Image: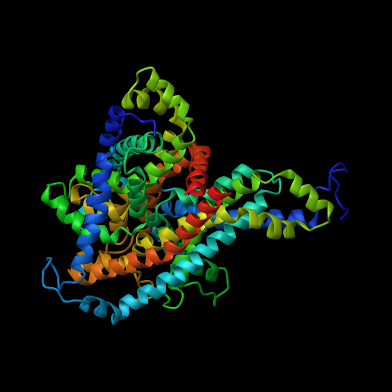
């Protein structure tokens, strides 16, 4: 490179704090946590190694297994729901609609709100004694039931509903930006061939939005693993273990139950999960960049 | 329907499809607006009226007392000072965190993309990995380390934590931005004798103002809306609004005052909402740019 020694030194010095964060904070604390997961630490760290005992305890914990199952159900439905609703909204807005910017504002504003606020709003709406259920019943439909937050079988879907309400606007914005980038020629060509509008969106527009939607899905999926606030605000893991999630399980054991070893084992499993989920994606990107470079 | 032609007449404006389209948009808008509407009307009702279970009904009389209580009298556990203190805590946490993380991120992006010192790619890779990994694995050792340097449960501590966890995203956005700046600009300034910092402050930072705005908005809403880090690192005296809100609502003593809860909820959401409504275009641009480039 053409970079000379002296300025290079400034650049290196400028990056030192970031090096510190990357190496000491990110790698260092992670290594520390992983080490703790092999000890019998409870309230305070211990240096007594117990091998994989914490991991086998984790695997036999009904709460942990329920939390994994819950986050899987929530994650799949939340990401799919946001992508589907977001894409539909973008496609609708793309049809030369009046008041487009008003609609866009309405669909996106929940994204500016925190998960705590989102959780509390929906907890209120879905509260069976005072919320939508009571309101509809008082209109005369006495058997109407919408008790998701207190119903074991439905509580996880209440979280999905709130999550999609909060996140669909993000997908809409990204998809709409992508749609506006597609040339008018393609539209004209497809219309001359007499292809119905919905087919154009499904077969022509959707494939071109692939990378943008994948990025949006990735962004949402990364949030899924961290899911914590919305659960605390909306159901606090209940009823029973119906909405328990790994991030909350770890926090409870870390600070509430003083069960360091188990908590760090759980966190390690989560990190492994992220690596397993992200690695193929990164590898595909790497290969694509390589292919591009060769071409 | 007649087959449209690029040069043909405009298709008819009102068709079944158009009506369906507007119906879909209208129902969707209702779905997105209903929670906000419900919150606002609930916050303006008295508890007697709320107990009737008519959450969509407009309040019989507009009663702002719940807002006053939420702001300055609502209880968190045994302390009844309202969400006011949390508001100022959130301001005190968010402003310095945003300023610092945006500055450091801009320097990082600039150094990583235009100077590329040794190990730049490795550092960037490590940062990105750090951004992907769930916070839970960092938390306990960070609490211990912060306690050792006397920053645990302090304002400076929570600010530091926000800067640290903001670095991956902020650096990524600035790096992507500076990569598109022509290298010749940097080279020409160097020929003129400007060094690393002078080029940064006099050329690159002014060029990057649009990105600074976008990143600041994203960081502001992100940090304002944070719950987990504030809960763990801020300490009792500095708890941000989100944590206090959850404490107010999920307090177990006495009857739940839903009107106060909803007013407190709106108060917590109002700052990010105001930012979004006042500068929605930047917000949209930032989200689209940040996501598509990720």
Q: Is residue A57 left or right of residue A96?
A: left
Q: Position of residue A249 (x, y in %)?
A: 29, 69
Q: Position of residue A109 (x, y in %)?
A: 50, 48
Q: Is residue A114 left or right of residue A85?
A: left
Q: Is residue A161 above or below residue B65?
A: below
Q: Nearer the viewer, residue A53 or B139?
A: A53
Say how many tags the image has. 0
Kindly identify the residue that appears in the image at 46 percent across and 30 percent down. Answer: B183
Q: Nearer the viewer, residue B70 or A93?
A: A93
Find residue A152 and report its image quarter.
Answer: bottom left
Kindly identify the residue that appears in the image at 16 percent across and 76 percent down. Answer: A50
Q: Position of residue A120 (x, y in %)?
A: 39, 59
* Residue A236 shows in this picture: no
Q: Is residue B271 above or below residue B57?
A: above
Q: Nearer the viewer, residue B65 or A267?
A: A267
* Residue A266 shows in this picture: yes
Q: Nearer the viewer, residue B92 or A24?
A: A24
Kindly identify the residue that appears in the image at 24 percent across and 79 percent down. Answer: A57
């Amino acid at each position: 490179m053409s970079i000379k020694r002296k300025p290079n030194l400034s650049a290196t010095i400028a990056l030192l704090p970031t090096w510190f964060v990357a190496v000491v904070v990110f790698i260092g604390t992670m290594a520390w946590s992983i080490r703790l997961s092999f000890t019998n630490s409870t309230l305070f760290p211990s240096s007594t190694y117990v091998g994989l005992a914490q991991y086998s305890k984790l695997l036999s914990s009904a709460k942990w297994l329920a939390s994994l199952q819950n986050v899987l159900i929530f994650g799949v439905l939340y990401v799919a729901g946001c992508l589907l609703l977001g894409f539909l909204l973008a496609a609708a807005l793309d049809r030369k609609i009046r008041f487009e910017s008003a609609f866009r504002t309405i669909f996106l504003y929940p994204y500016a709100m925190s998960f705590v606020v989102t959780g509390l709003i929906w907890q209120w709406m879905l509260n069976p004694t005072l919320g939508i259920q009571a309101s509809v019943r008082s209109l005369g439909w006495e058997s109407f039931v919408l008790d998701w937050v207190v119903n074991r079988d439905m509580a996880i879907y209440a979280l999905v509903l709130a999550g999609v309400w909060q996140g669909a606007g993000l997908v809409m914005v990204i998809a709409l930006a992508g749609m506006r980038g597609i040339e008018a020629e393609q539209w004209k060509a497809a219309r001359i061939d007499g292809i119905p509008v919905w087919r154009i969106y499904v077969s022509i527009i959707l494939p071109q939005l692939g990378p943008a939607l994948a990025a949006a899905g990735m962004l949402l999926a990364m949030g899924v693993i961290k899911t914590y606030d919305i659960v605390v605000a909306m159901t606090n893991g209940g009823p029973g273990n119906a909405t328990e999630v790994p991030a909350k399980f770890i926090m409870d054991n870390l600070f509430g139950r003083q069960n360091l070893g188990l908590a760090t084992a759980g966190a390690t499993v989560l990190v492994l999960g992220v690596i397993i989920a992200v690695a193929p994606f990164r590898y595909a990107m790497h290969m694509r960049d390589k292919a591009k470079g060769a071409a | 329907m007649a087959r449209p032609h690029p040069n043909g007449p405009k298709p008819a404006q009102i068709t079944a499809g158009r009506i369906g389209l507007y119906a879909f948009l209208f129902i969707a808008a209702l779905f997105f607006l209903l929670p906000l509407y419900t919150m606002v009307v609930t916050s303006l009702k008295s508890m007697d009226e709320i107990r009737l279970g008519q959450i969509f009904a407009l309040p019989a009389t507009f009663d702002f007392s719940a807002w006053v209580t939420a702001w300055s009298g609502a209880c968190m556990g045994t302390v009844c000072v309202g969400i006011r203190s949390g508001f100022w805590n959130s301001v005190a946490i968010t402003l310095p965190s945003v300023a610092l993380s945006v500055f450091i991120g801009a320097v990082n992006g600039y150094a990583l993309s235009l100077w590329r010192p040794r190990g730049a790619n490795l550092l960037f890779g490590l940062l990105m990995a750090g951004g992907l990994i769930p916070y839970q694995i960092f938390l306990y050792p960070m609490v211990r380390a912060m306690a050792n340097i006397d920053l645990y449960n302090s304002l400076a501590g929570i600010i530091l934590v926000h800067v640290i966890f903001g670095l991956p995203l902020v650096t990524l956005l600035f790096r992507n931005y500076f990569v598109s700046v022509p290298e010749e600009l940097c080279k020409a300034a160097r020929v003129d004798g400007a060094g690393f910092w002078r080029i940064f402050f006099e050329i690159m930072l002014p060029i990057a103002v649009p990105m600074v705005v976008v990143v600041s908005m994203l960081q502001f809403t992100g940090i304002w809306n944070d719950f987990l880090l504030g809960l763990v690192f801020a300490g009792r005296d500095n708890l941000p609004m989100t944590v206090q809100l959850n404490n107010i609502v999920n307090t177990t003593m006495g009857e739940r005052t839903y009107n106060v809860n909803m007013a407190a909820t709106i108060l917590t959401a109002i700052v990010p909402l105001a930012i979004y409504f006042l500068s929605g275009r930047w917000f949209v641009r930032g989200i689209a740019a940040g996501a598509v480039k990720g």
